Amino acid sequence: MKQEQPFEKSEIILTGDRATGPLHLGHYVGSLKQRVSLQWMHEQTILVADMQGLTDNAHNPTKVSSNILNVVADYLAVGIEPTQTTICLQSQLPALAELTMYYSNLVSIARLERNPTVKSEIKSKSFGRSIPTGFFTYPISQAADITAFKATLIPVGDDQLPMLEQTNEIVRKVNKLAGKKILDECRPLLSNAPRLPSTDGKNKMSKTMGNAINLGASEKEISAAVKAMYTDPSHLRVEDPGQVDGNIVFTYLDAFHPDKKYIDGLKSHYKQGGLGDGTTKKILEECLQDMLRPIREKRAEYLNDKAQLINILKKGSKSARENSEKVLFDVRGIFGLNIF
Amino acid sequence: MKQEQPFEKSEIILTGDRATGPLHLGHYVGSLKQRVSLQWMHEQTILVADMQGLTDNAHNPTKVSSNILNVVADYLAVGIEPTQTTICLQSQLPALAELTMYYSNLVSIARLERNPTVKSEIKSKSFGRSIPTGFFTYPISQAADITAFKATLIPVGDDQLPMLEQTNEIVRKVNKLAGKKILDECRPLLSNAPRLPSTDGKNKMSKTMGNAINLGASEKEISAAVKAMYTDPSHLRVEDPGQVDGNIVFTYLDAFHPDKKYIDGLKSHYKQGGLGDGTTKKILEECLQDMLRPIREKRAEYLNDKAQLINILKKGSKSARENSEKVLFDVRGIFGLNIF
């Protein structure tokens, strides 16, 4: 399904996911939908970040390896087109590790310790000083990823902005050493989609918490997830007025139901009283079932043909490898090491 | 000058030097002489550590790049045989950077902070927390170097023993994850040569201090260095008895003069009195001039044919690259990432 390109693609975009679990509705709203449209306008590369996934899973590596093809199937199922988007695997691109080594010499330990994103992740994972070195230093590795593709536009949440700052600091240091512009600074592309809450309304979505609906969720799983969804705990009888704010069913209806006007009507009714959670959940379930059915089916088809998935990843990685080697050549040149 | 191999070479040895300056007499006594004999008994690889040299010289990279061929010429001039020893360049071996990334996930920041060698280097270089990340993490990178060649015997000074401990810890973790022996533990080969003092008797030898005699030193430089050498400051008149201990001229005579008995006689004479520093220095100078003349000449010949030097380094790096890629394949396999 190759489309005509009526214009030059304008920017280079790098996005990606740690391959540590199948993707879910949070990813869909927060990034995948956006990537599907971005791919027609921009040179988009999606990096399946298996190496980064290992930075805090080295002792449980199947959590990463078993999810690589799942994630690729998720991409294809939602409409990422391998003819438009380069899908590649981090561990297949040695230039990323090499660039990380060069950049490591330009970033102090003190600078890494100041990184707010790493700080809060250390805290949330209760790492303390026992943090794996690879995890602690991953902002440098991310700078390698971004610069290896000459990416200028990076779709991120605002919690990731310090990562782009770190990248741009490295870019400026490299360019200063080179005495000319070798690398490009990047800009964030902030998503306007609000973060989708977990189905229990409590935590960040995660597979292990069982509070996320995966893109490959079965009909039964979707049904069970919607039935268990957090609503308004004080809305005990159908005739009581109900709260819409913080009611996850309505948050999901806002995010996924195509008919905004209809949902506005439902909200008024719910607030007045007389609309039960059973009914709103039924409406949400139908909407999610309709949306996820074709995605689930496509996903299963792709996963039934692993050779094809591997082939897409291989082809993408080959092209990414060539591009990243060119950047490595330039960076190595600054250090006078292109001897042969 | 290929020699017959009457026996299987017994162990795999990895040695190397940071390419941050030309090699001097300290290197000659401390490691180069040993390497020349080891190469006939063992599979020896010498890694020209340009990447490691950059860990604290990224802002002055020519200090590294301009010394790579000098160091290779030093090797060849003292008798390292490229037919017997693989001489390779660290930056040409991407598997080393990739292994470093994998191993980084198995070593905590706390563990690196406890490394006594790094601790004392941080202190001596007054880095504090502004230490470059690449320098702080170089024990992991050294583990990558050692394991990438399956080296089992590592010639080191005892200040480097913590590095081998760190390597073996990583080896055990990798093997445990693999459930079988993938990597070999290494043992130190401690040199029995005492550390050669600097010509001023004060500091560690270094080119910038001007207190070392380089292997490529000119006749005049050797002469000047010996004339300025630290002796016994209380030995004012020829007829006075003199101190041999701490007298750098005698330390160098011990290290380099072929006739031990003659030197013993000189020492007795000096202690009794009646032997002037002018005379001992003349003897030392003649000895060093004789020893360094052929080395200097060979070194200059090699440096006159840079294409040949590059070729040796290229050939060695190609073979090292192949071997290191095999180890990388095994390590990547543990993490389930040999997908294609």
Image: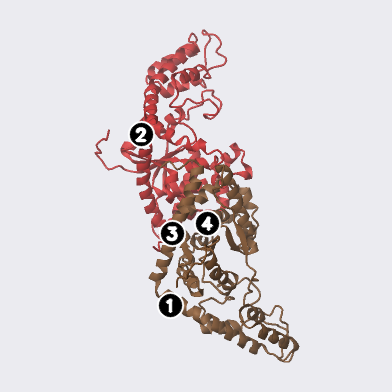
Chain colours: A brown, B red
Pointer 1 and pointer 4 on the same chain: yes
Q: Which residue is mark 2?
A: B80
Q: Chain of mark 3?
A: A
Pointer 2 and pointer 3 on the same chain: no
Q: Which mark is residue B208?
A: none
Q: Which residue is mark 3?
A: A319
Pointer 3 and pointer 1 on the same chain: yes
Dot 4 alpha-carbon crowd within 10 angstroms: few under 14, some 14 to 19, many 20 or more: many
Could you tell me the amino acid type at mark 3? Answer: Ser
Q: Which residue is mark 1?
A: A301
Dot 3 alpha-carbon crowd within 10 angstroms: few under 14, some 14 to 19, many 20 or more: few
Q: Say if residue A189 shows up in the picture.
A: yes
What is the quadrant of the N terminus of chain A in the image?
A: bottom left
Label 4 – label 2 distance at C-alpha: 40 Å
Depth check, front residue: B243 or B16: B16
Q: Which residue is mark 4?
A: A145
Label 1: element kind: helix
Depth check, front residue: A300 or A262: A262
Depth check, front residue: A54 or A14: A14
Looking at the image, do the residues carrying marks 2 and 3 touch, with CB atoms under 8 Å apart?
no
Label 3 – label 1 distance at C-alpha: 25 Å
Could you tell me the amino acid type at mark 4? Answer: Asp
